[in-house]
Image (spheres, rainbow, N blue to C red):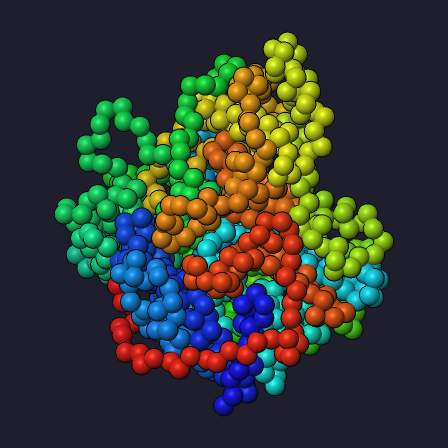
C-alpha cells in the first residue's frame, strides 16, 4: 500500500495512491486534516444533531433533518449500494476510514471544537451519502410550492408567472463550452462558476486524485469521495449547473390518531397505518425537545401531524420556547396587535443554510406604498384543498387534521447516484461521462463535457418523476387520486451539443424546460453567449473576463419606468438623468450602480408594502427552515422585472411607487460606490469573532449579472450567495487550466491557506492548476491517532 500527499503553493492537496480504494482513504484523511470542523458540522446536520453544540439557532434545521429522515434515507441508499454496486460501496467505506483516521489530528488543528465544546465523533459508511443528501435536499427549492399555493390563493393563478424567477432560495450556476474550432489551440474549453451560498470553509475543495486507474483534478464536496460536479481527467472534462428541475413533491396529508397509532387517508378513500416514533433533539444549554416522526406511504411528514400544522409536534412544557423557535408555533397568548415575527433574510439562508440571518435588520412593513385604490382581493382558482394554507383545521367529518409530507427520489428509489462517482473518475471520453451519468439521481443537473478527440456532450442528468402537473406547482391532496408517481422522465440531450461552437448553461429555460417550473431569467445566459460570439476564437486566458462581467440585463425594466417620469424635483430629475446615462454595469467602484440599487430597493419595499400583498406577509405556521421561500420582500425583489412590465399589477400604481422611490433616494443618496454596501456575508457555523476582517470584502456584480453576487433588493445589499468556485478546463493542456475558491484550501482559521485565495476571488483572478508532481511539495501524512468507537448518532 502506497499513499503520497503533496501540496502546491496554495496548499491544495495532490494525492497519489496504489489503488482507487487507497486513494479514497487518502482523500478522506486529507479532508479531515484540512476540514475537520466542516466535516463534523456536516455530519451532525445530516443526523439532525447540530443543535447539541450550535444551540437553539440550529434547532429548526435539526427537526427538519430528522422529520425528513435524511440519515435514515442515507442508510437505505448505502444498503442498496452494497447490494447493487459493492465496489463503490467499498470505495466509500475506504473514504470513511480515512476520515476517521484523520479526524483526531484535524480536530486538534481547528479551534472551533473547543469553542463549541465538541469532540470529534465517528463517521459511518453511509455518512458521505447523508452529507450529500443534507447538502442538496433543499437544492430544488420544494418550499417554493408553499409560496405558489399562498400566492395563487390570495392573488390568483397568474401570480405563478409573475413571481417565477430564480428566487432567493435556489442555487444556480454559469457554465459554457467552446469547441476546438472556436479556440486558439483547436481543443475545447469548459468554464464557469457554481453559484451557491458562500460558506467558510468553502463548499468546494480543490483536489488532485491520482492512482494507476485515473488522474483527475477537480472540485470535490468535503465529506464525499471523488469529484462529482467539476473535473478534468486529462482527456475529458465536465461541469454542471442546476437544471432547475422539479423532482420533489409536497402532499397534504389527512392524519388521525387512533388507539393503534396514526392513520393517513389514502387516495383509495381508506385509512392506512402510518409509521411513527419519537426522538429527542438535544440543544446546547437547554432541555431536550421530543419530536414525533411520522411517515405515510407518500413520504415523511415534515410539518404538522395528527393535531394539524399548528401543532407541529408534541412539545414538552418545560421547553416550549425552544420548540416554538424550531416549529414556528405561535405563542399560547400572543399580545394583542403584536407584530409578526420578522422574515428570515435569504441573505443568510440557503438551499441548506436556514435559521441564521447574515444581515440582520428590519424588513419594511406596510404603510408607505403610494397610489392606486386596492382592488377586491383576487380569488384562487378551483382545485384548492380544504385547508390548503398555512394552517390545517380539523375536519369535523373524520376527526383528521392536515400535515405536509415530502416525497423525494432517494427515499423512494433507495438510490442517490453514487454509482456514477467512480466511473466519472475513470472516464476518458464524453461517451464515458455520458454512461456514468446514467446512474445519477440527485440533484438534477445540466452537464457539459468535452474530450481531447473533439467530442462534446450537453445533457440533463438525474431522476425526475413523472406525475400530474399539479404536483409540480403546489402541495397536492394525498387523499385524492391522480397524484402518484409514474416512473421517471427521460433526461433531455442537446444534439448537436453546441450551436456555432458554443453551448451555454445558466439555469435559464432551455434544455431542461420540460422538467421544471421556475427558471432563471435569460440575462446571464444571453450575456455569456453574446460575449463569446463577440470574438472568433478564445483561449483560457480570456475566460476570467466572462466570469467577472457586470452588465445588468434586468435593469431595463426599472430604467424604462424612470425614463417616462415627469414633474420631478430637481434632485430627483438629476438622479433620473444620471441613471439613464449609466452603463448598466454593477462595477465595484460605481456610484451609479449604488444609486440604481438604492432606487431598486426602495421600489421593492413600496410594492411589497401595498395592501394587496398584505395576506402574503402573515407568518405561516411552517417551520423556520421553510420560511425563506415564503418571504414577500425577496420574492418581489427577484421578480421586480416581471412585476414592472406586467400589463396590470392588481391595480397598484407602479408609476407612483417608482416616483416615490426616486424622490426618496434623491433626498438621501448613497455616499459611496456599490462595493461599500455590496459586501460578502458568508455563512459560518459559529458566529465569527468581531474585529478586523469580520466584515467581508466589497464586491462587484449582482443577481442577474454573469458575476452573480446576489443582493436581496429591498432587504440588503450584502451577498451571501455567489460564485462558490470558478474554473477553466483546457482540453489542449490540463496544466493550462485554472481555478479559484472564495477562501482557501485549508478550513482552519488563521492557517496560511485559509483565506489566501480570497483576494484573487474578489478580483476575478484564478490560480493555476498544477499537475506536474515535480513542482509539488511532498507532505508526510500524520500517523492516525487511536480513535474510540462511538455511537452512530452522537448527540
Outermost residue toward the bottom in this view: 1
Relative side of 421 to 304, left or right? right
Q: Nearer the viewer, residue 785 or 507?
A: 785
Q: Residue at x 32, y 31 (%)?
A: 340
Q: Nearer the viewer, residue 416 or 387?
A: 416
Please state the horizontal and vertical placement of residue 482, each as a whole percent of the image.
Answer: 47, 51
Q: Residue at x 36, y 53 (%)?
A: 686
Q: Is any atom of residue 458 visible in this view?
A: no
Tell me if residue 178 comes above or below residue 364 in the rendering.
below
Please state the horizontal and vertical placement of residue 726, each as a whole percent of the image.
Answer: 62, 57
Q: Nearer the viewer, residue 229 or 460?
A: 229
Relative side of 521 to 51, left or right? right
Please state the horizontal and vertical placement of residue 160, each as a whole percent of the image.
Answer: 54, 37
Q: Is any atom of residue 7 visible in this view?
A: yes
Tell me if residue 286 comes above or below residue 23 in the rendering.
above
Q: Residue at x 62, y 30 (%)?
A: 591
Amino acid at each position: 500500500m502506497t499513499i503520497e500527499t503533496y501540496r502546491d503553493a496554495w496548499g491544495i492537496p495532490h494525492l497519489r495512491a496504489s489503488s482507487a480504494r487507497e486513494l479514497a482513504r487518502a482523500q478522506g484523511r486529507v479532508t479531515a486534516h484540512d476540514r475537520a470542523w466542516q466535516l463534523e458540522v456536516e455530519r451532525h446536520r445530516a443526523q439532525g444533531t447540530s443543535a447539541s453544540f450550535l444551540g437553539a439557532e440550529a434547532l429548526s434545521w435539526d427537526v427538519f433533518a430528522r422529520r425528513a429522515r435524511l440519515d435514515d434515507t442515507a442508510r437505505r441508499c448505502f444498503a442498496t449500494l452494497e447490494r447493487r454496486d459493492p465496489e463503490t460501496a467499498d470505495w466509500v467505506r475506504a473514504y470513511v476510514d480515512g476520515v476517521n483516521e484523520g479526524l483526531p489530528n484535524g480536530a486538534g488543528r481547528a479551534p472551533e471544537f473547543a469553542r463549541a465544546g465538541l469532540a470529534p465523533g465517528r463517521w459511518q459508511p453511509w455518512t458521505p451519502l447523508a452529507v450529500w443528501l443534507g447538502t442538496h435536499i433543499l437544492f430544488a427549492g420544494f418550499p417554493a410550492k408553499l409560496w405558489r399555493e399562498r400566492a395563487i390563493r390570495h392573488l390568483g393563478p397568474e401570480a405563478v408567472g409573475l413571481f417565477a424567477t430564480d428566487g432567493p432560495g435556489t442555487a444556480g450556476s454559469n457554465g459554457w463550452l467552446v469547441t476546438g474550432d472556436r479556440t486558439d489551440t483547436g481543443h475545447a474549453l469548459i468554464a464557469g462558476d457554481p453559484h451557491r451560498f458562500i460558506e467558510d470553509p468553502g463548499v468546494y475543495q480543490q483536489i488532485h486524485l491520482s492512482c494507476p486507474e485515473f488522474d483527475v483534478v477537480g472540485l470535490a464536496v468535503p465529506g464525499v469521495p471523488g469529484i462529482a460536479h467539476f473535473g478534468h481527467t486529462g482527456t475529458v472534462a465536465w461541469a454542471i449547473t442546476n437544471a432547475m428541475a422539479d423532482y420533489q413533491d409536497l402532499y397534504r396529508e389527512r392524519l388521525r390518531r387512533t388507539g393503534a397509532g396514526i392513520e393517513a387517508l389514502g387516495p383509495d378513500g381508506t385509512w392506512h397505518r402510518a409509521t411513527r416514533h419519537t426522538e429527542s433533539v438535544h440543544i446546547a444549554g437547554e432541555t431536550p425537545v421530543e419530536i414525533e416522526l411520522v411517515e405515510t406511504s407518500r413520504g415523511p411528514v415534515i410539518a404538522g401531524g395528527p393535531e394539524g400544522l399548528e401543532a407541529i409536534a408534541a412539545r414538552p412544557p418545560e421547553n416550549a420556547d425552544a420548540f416554538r423557535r424550531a416549529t414556528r408555533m405561535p405563542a399560547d397568548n400572543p399580545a394583542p396587535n403584536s407584530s409578526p415575527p420578522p422574515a428570515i433574510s435569504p441573505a443568510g439562508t440557503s438551499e441548506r443554510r436556514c435559521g441564521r440571518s447574515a444581515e440582520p435588520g428590519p424588513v419594511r412593513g406596510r404603510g408607505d406604498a403610494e397610489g392606486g385604490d386596492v382592488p377586491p382581493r383576487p380569488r384562487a382558482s378551483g382545485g384548492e384543498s380544504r385547508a390548503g394554507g398555512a394552517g390545517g383545521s380539523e375536519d369535523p367529518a373524520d376527526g383528521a387534521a392536515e400535515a405536509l409530507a415530502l416525497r423525494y427520489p432517494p427515499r423512494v428509489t433507495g438510490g442517490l447516484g453514487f454509482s456514477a462517482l467512480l466511473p466519472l473518475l475513470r472516464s476518458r471520453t464524453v461517451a464515458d461521462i455520458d454512461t456514468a451519468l446514467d446512474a445519477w439521481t440527485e440533484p438534477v443537473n445540466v452537464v457539459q463535457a468535452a474530450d481531447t478527440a473533439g467530442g462534446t456532450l450537453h445533457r440533463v442528468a438525474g431522476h425526475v418523476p413523472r406525475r400530474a402537473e399539479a404536483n409540480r406547482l403546489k402541495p397536492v391532496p394525498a387523499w385524492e387520486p391522480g397524484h402518484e408517481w409514474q416512473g421517471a422522465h427521460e433526461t433531455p440531450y442537446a444534439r448537436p451539443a453546441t450551436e456555432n461552437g458554443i453551448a451555454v448553461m445558466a439555469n435559464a429555460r432551455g434544455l431542461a424546460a420540460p422538467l421544471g417550473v421556475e427558471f432563471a431569467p435569460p440575462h446571464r445566459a444571453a450575456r455569456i453567449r453574446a460575449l463569446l460570439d463577440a470574438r472568433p476564437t478564445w483561449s483560457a486566458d480570456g475566460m476570467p473576463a466572462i466570469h467577472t462581467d457586470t452588465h445588468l440585463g434586468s435593469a431595463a425594466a426599472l430604467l424604462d419606468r424612470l425614463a417616462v417620469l415627469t414633474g420631478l424635483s430637481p434632485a430627483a430629475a438629476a438622479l433620473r438623468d444620471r441613471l439613464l446615462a449609466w452603463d448598466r454595469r454593477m462595477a465595484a467602484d460605481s456610484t451609479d450602480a449604488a444609486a440604481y440599487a438604492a432606487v431598486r430597493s426602495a421600489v421593492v419595499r413600496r410594492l411589497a408594502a401595498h395592501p394587496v400583498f398584505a395576506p402574503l406577509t402573515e407568518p405561516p405556521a411552517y417551520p423556520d427552515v421553510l420560511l425563506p421561500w415564503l418571504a414577500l420582500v425577496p420574492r418581489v425583489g427577484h421578480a421586480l422585472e416581471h412585476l414592472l412590465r406586467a400589463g396590470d399589477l392588481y391595480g397598484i400604481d407602479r408609476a407612483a411607487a417608482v416616483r416615490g422611490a426616486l424622490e426618496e433616494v434623491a433626498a438621501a443618496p448613497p455616499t459611496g460606490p456599490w462595493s461599500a454596501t455590496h459586501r460578502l456575508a458568508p455563512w459560518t457555523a459559529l458566529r465569527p469573532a468581531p474585529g478586523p476582517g469580520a466584515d467581508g470584502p466589497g464586491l462587484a456584480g449582482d443577481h442577474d449579472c454573469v458575476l452573480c453576487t446576489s443582493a436581496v433588493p429591498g432587504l440588503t445589499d450584502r451577498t451571501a450567495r455567489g460564485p462558490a468556485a470558478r474554473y477553466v478546463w483546457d482540453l489542449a493542456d490540463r496544466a493550462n487550466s485554472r481555478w479559484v475558491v472564495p477562501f482557501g484550501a485549508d478550513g482552519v482559521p488563521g492557517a496560511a491557506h485559509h483565506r489566501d485565495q480570497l483576494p484573487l476571488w474578489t478580483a476575478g483572478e484564478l490560480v493555476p492548476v498544477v499537475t506536474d508532481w515535480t513542482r509539488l511539495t511532498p507532505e508526510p501524512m500524520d500517523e492516525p491517532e487511536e480513535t474510540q468507537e462511538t455511537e452512530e448518532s452522537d448527540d
